């Protein structure tokens, strides 16, 4: 805790120094306002006690400059002159915390100085917290911008994926071959338009393959036969094959593909 004492009377500075030293303060002294301003350029001071009537610069003039340059300091006027104008000027221009009179009461002065330092330290903590909040808000703003950018990128990516999926769905639906996807439990997950049109009874997603897929094709699915086989169904030669759907080495289902072939094709 550093305190600056400013008074043009050396005996006052010495008396204040003896009084306040017992409280463990780091005490700086100046006998003019200008000297006090010089000390403040190289020292961080929490509390200033200044005389009012000094040559060259009054206490109010000195503390007014201090207020502009070092607004967090706690400023106290200690004066033997208590005219109303001095008090008013000190409060209005120097933003004075206390206006004390000479001669002073030792214990009261010590109490006021302790209270002034507590006020100063509270302000320092508040400023530190405000700075932390400002810093956190800046970081949050940066994070929000990054998240917004990522969200926009993800949104664009999702839109592209949706469009690609729609195109894939349309392509699958309009393929000139029948495609039937069957999951590991035998449930039909997808059946395109050709599959629904060519096979009777009609094959639709959500049905059990064993109940609706004709036996010759169901046999190919059961065997997982990837080699094309030509069959006749509803008097129409058709080539059928099955592919396994694998993920991480584990089978997830099977795809049955059926192609209509020409009349001269050899039927197994």
Image (cartoon, rainbow, N blue to C red):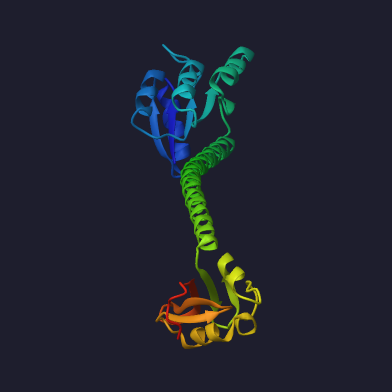
What x and y, as percent, mark residue 194? Answer: 56, 67
Residue sitting at x 42%, y 26%: 11
Residue lying at 61% horizontally and 12% vertically, measured from the top left: 85
Asked whether, in this view, residue 91 is left or right of residue 14, the answer is right
* Residue furthest front as drawn: 264
Identified at 38% across, 32% down, the residue is 28
Name the residue: 52% across, 28% down.
75
Picture layout, residue 193 above or below residue 85: below
Give the camera-side residue of 263 and 198: 263
Can the viewer see residue 192 in this picture? no
Residue 24 sits above or below residue 83 on the image: below
Percent of width and height locating residue 39: 35, 27
Q: Splitting the image into 4 quarters, where does residue 86 fall?
A: top right
Residue 180, horizontal then vertical, whole percent: 54, 73
Q: Is residue 100 left or right of residue 30?
A: right
- The quarter of the rendered structure image containing the N terminus is top left
Is residue 136 placed above or below 222 in the rendered structure?
above
């Amino acid at each position: 805790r550093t305190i600056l004492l400013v008074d043009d009377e050396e005996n006052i500075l010495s008396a204040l120094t003896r009084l306040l030293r017992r409280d463990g303060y780091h005490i700086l002294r100046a006998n003019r306002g200008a000297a006090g301003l010089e000390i403040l350029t190289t020292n961080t001071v929490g509390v200033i006690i200044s005389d009012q009537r000094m040559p060259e610069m009054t206490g109010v003039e000195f503390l007014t400059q201090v207020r502009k340059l070092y607004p967090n300091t706690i400023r106290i006027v200690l004066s033997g002159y208590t005219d109303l104008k001095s008090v008013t000027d000190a409060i209005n221009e120097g933003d004075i915390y206390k206006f004390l009179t000479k001669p002073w009461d030792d214990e009261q002065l010590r109490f006021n100085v302790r209270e002034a330092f507590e006020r100063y330290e509270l302000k320092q903590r508040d400023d530190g917290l405000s700075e932390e909040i400002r810093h956190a808000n800046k970081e949050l703003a940066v994070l929000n911008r990054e998240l917004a950018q990522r969200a926009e990128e993800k949104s664009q990516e999702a839109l592209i994926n949706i469009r690609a999926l729609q195109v894939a769905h349309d392509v699958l639906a309009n393929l000139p071959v029948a495609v039937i996807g069957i999951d590991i439990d035998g449930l039909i997950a997808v059946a395109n338009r050709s599959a629904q049109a060519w096979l009777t009874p009609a094959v639709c997603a959500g049905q059990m393959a064993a109940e609706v897929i004709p036996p010759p094709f169901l046999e190919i699915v059961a065997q997982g036969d990837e080699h094309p086989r030509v069959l006749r169904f509803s008097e129409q030669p058709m080539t059928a094959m099955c592919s396994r759907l694998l993920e991480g080495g584990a089978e997830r289902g099977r795809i049955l593909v059926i192609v209509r072939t020409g009349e001269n094709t050899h039927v197994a």
